[in-house]
C-alpha cells in the first residue's frame, strides 16, 4: 500500500478547493469533471428510485438487469459494437472498472504497454497485481499519438495487455480511425489484450470522431475490454457509475471479484444511470458546444505565452501544453527544474492550480481542464499569461 501513489488530479483539485475555502482567490484547472448539472430527467429518476422500496435492498452484483440491457443497447447505438447484457458489469465509476478489469486480466510478471502521457490511475492496479508497466512516450510533435512501430518495439514475450484511450485524458488527442484499426490489428496479431477507455466518446470537436477499437479492428474483439461510464457524457461524476464490457469469461470473473469487493453499485445511482443511457444525448450536445468554445479560448491564450507549445485539443476537455520552453528561462527571477515546480509556483504566486505533467508520465508538460466557467477560464489563464510573459 505504501507503494501506491495518491491521485495527483484529485490532490490538485482538493488543494485548490481548500485554498478557496480559506478565502484565497484560487482558480482550479485540475478537476476532470463537467461543470454542468446532471440533466433534470436523470435526477428525477433518482428521486423516484429513492421512494421505491425495491431500491432499498441489495441488487445483483453485476448491475440491475435493466441497466445492463440498456448499456448493451447504448453500446450498439453509439459505437456499433454488439454485446450481450451478460458481458456488461456495472461498477462504482470508471476507476473501479479499470481496477477490476486489470485485476482480472493480469498475473504477476505480466507486462502492460502504456502510452504516455497517461491517466495516473492506469499504472496503479498494474503494480498492485505485481505486473510491470512499460511506458511508451509520445510528445507534442506526434500529437500525443503512439505508433504501431513504437508498440512493437516495446513488445516482449511477457506483454499481456495494451491500455488505449481515445479521446485522451490528459492530452485531448483523438486517434484517426485508420490508426485505431492498425493498433487493434497489431494487438490481435500478437494475442495481446486491449483495455480501451471510451469514457470521452461523445466529446470530440471539429472533424475528429471517436471510433471503438473492436469495431474497426474486429479481430481484436475477443481480447478487448471496454471501459465506460456516465460521468463525462451526462455530467454525473459524483453518481459513481461506470462499467466494463468484456468477453464473457472476463465479465464473469470480474463479477466474482466485485461480489467480494463492493457487491452492487448503489441502486439510486443505477436508476439514474438507466435514465441517462436510455435517454437522449441532447445534454452532451449542449455541453460539447460550450467546451468547444472554451477550448478555443484556452488554446488562444496559452499560445500567447513565450516558450509554450499547445496543440488544439481534439477531444475530452483538456489542454496539454508543453512548458519546456518556459523551463529553459528564469521565471520570477529563478530557474525552475521541472513542470512540478512551475505548477507549485503558479499556485503560490498567481493562485492558479494546474496539474504538472509528471503525474501523467510527461515531465515538462501540464494539464489544464477547460470544464469551468468562461469568466474563470479567461481570468485564470490570463493570470498565467501575465506571469509567464
Image (cartoon, grey):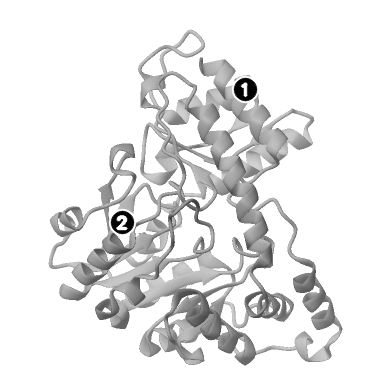
Q: Residue furthest front?
A: 207
Above or below for 338 versus 261 = above
Residue under circle 1? Answer: 383
Q: Position of residue 272 (x, y in %)?
A: 72, 75
Q: Position of residue 153 (x, y in %)?
A: 13, 55
Q: Is residue 324 left or right of residue 64?
A: left
Q: Position of residue 308 (x, y in %)?
A: 42, 26
Above or below for 372 versus 278 = above
Task: Say which residue appears at 25% left-offset and 64% top-offset.
Answer: 183
Mark 2 touching mark 1, by CB under 8 A? no
Q: Position of residue 334 (x, y in %)?
A: 45, 11
Pick the residue in front: 386 or 333. 386
Q: Is residue 338 left or right of residue 39?
A: left
Pick the residue in front: 346 or 318. 318
Q: Quadrant of residue 91?
A: bottom right
Q: Earlier in the sequence, mark 2 or mark 1?
A: 2
**Residue 132 in view, yes or no:** no
Spatial separation of the CA atoms under disc 2 and disc 1: 34 Å
Q: Estimate how packed mark 2 is, as few (under 14), some (14 to 19) or many (20 or more) residues with alpha carbons within 10 Å.
A: many
Q: Quadrant of residue 281?
A: bottom right
Pick the residue in front: 171 or 13. 171
* SS for callout 1: helix
**Residue 315: mark in rendering:** none
Above or below for 66 versus 5 = below
**Residue 54 in view, yes or no:** yes
Task: Say which residue appears at 63% left-offset and 22% top-offset.
Answer: 350
* SS for callout 2: strand
Residue under circle 2? Answer: 114
Q: Estimate how packed mark 1 is, as few (under 14), some (14 to 19) or many (20 or more) residues with alpha carbons within 10 Å.
A: some
Amino acid at each position: 500500500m505504501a507503494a501506491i501513489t495518491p491521485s495527483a488530479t484529485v490532490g490538485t483539485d482538493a488543494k485548490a478547493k481548500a485554498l478557496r475555502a480559506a478565502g484565497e482567490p484560487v482558480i482550479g484547472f485540475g478537476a476532470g469533471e463537467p461543470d454542468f448539472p446532471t440533466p433534470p430527467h436523470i435526477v428525477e429518476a433518482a428521486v423516484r428510485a429513492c421512494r421505491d422500496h425495491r431500491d432499498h435492498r441489495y441488487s445483483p452484483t453485476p448491475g440491475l438487469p435493466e441497466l445492463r440491457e440498456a448499456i448493451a443497447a447504448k453500446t450498439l447505438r453509439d459505437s456499433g459494437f454488439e454485446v450481450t447484457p451478460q458481458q456488461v458489469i456495472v461498477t462504482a465509476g470508471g476507476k473501479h472498472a479499470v481496477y477490476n478489469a486489470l485485476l482480472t486480466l493480469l498475473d504477476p510478471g505480466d507486462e502492460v504497454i502504456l502510452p504516455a502521457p497517461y491517466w495516473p490511475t492506469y499504472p496503479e492496479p498494474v503494480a498492485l497485481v505485481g505486473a510491470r508497466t512499460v511506458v511508451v512516450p509520445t510528445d507534442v510533435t506526434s500529437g500525443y499519438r503512439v505508433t504501431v512501430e513504437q508498440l512493437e518495439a516495446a513488445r516482449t514475450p511477457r506483454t499481456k495487455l495494451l491500455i488505449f484511450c481515445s479521446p485522451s485524458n490528459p492530452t485531448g488527442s483523438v486517434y484517426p480511425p485508420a490508426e485505431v484499426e492498425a493498433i487493434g490489428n497489431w494487438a490481435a496479431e500478437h494475442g495481446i489484450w486491449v483495455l480501451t477507455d471510451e469514457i470521452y466518446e461523445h466529446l470530440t470537436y471539429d472533424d475528429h470522431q471517436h471510433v471503438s477499437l473492436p469495431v474497426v479492428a474486429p479481430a481484436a474483439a475477443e481480447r478487448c475490454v471496454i471501459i465506460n461510464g456516465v460521468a463525462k457524457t451526462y455530467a454525473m461524476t459524483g453518481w459513481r457509475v461506470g462499467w466494463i464490457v468484456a468477453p464473457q469469461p472476463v465479465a464473469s470473473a470480474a463479477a466474482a471479484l466485485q461480489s467480494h469487493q463492493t457487491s452492487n453499485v448503489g441502486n439510486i445511482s443505477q436508476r439514474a444511470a438507466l435514465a441517462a443511457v436510455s435517454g437522449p444525448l441532447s445534454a452532451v450536445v449542449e455541453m460539447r458546444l460550450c467546451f468547444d468554445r472554451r477550448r478555443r479560448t484556452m488554446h488562444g491564450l496559452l499560445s500567447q505565452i513565450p516558450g509554450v507549445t499547445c496543440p488544439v485539443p481534439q477531444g475530452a476537455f483538456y489542454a496539454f501544453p508543453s512548458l519546456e520552453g518556459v523551463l529553459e528561462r528564469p521565471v520570477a527571477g529563478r530557474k525552475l527544474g521541472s513542470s512540478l515546480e512551475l505548477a507549485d509556483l503558479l499556485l503560490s504566486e498567481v493562485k492558479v492550480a494546474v496539474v504538472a505533467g509528471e503525474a501523467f508520465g510527461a515531465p515538462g508538460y501540464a494539464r489544464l481542464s477547460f470544464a469551468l466557467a468562461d469568466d474563470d477560464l479567461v481570468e485564470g489563464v490570463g493570470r498565467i499569461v501575465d506571469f509567464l510573459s
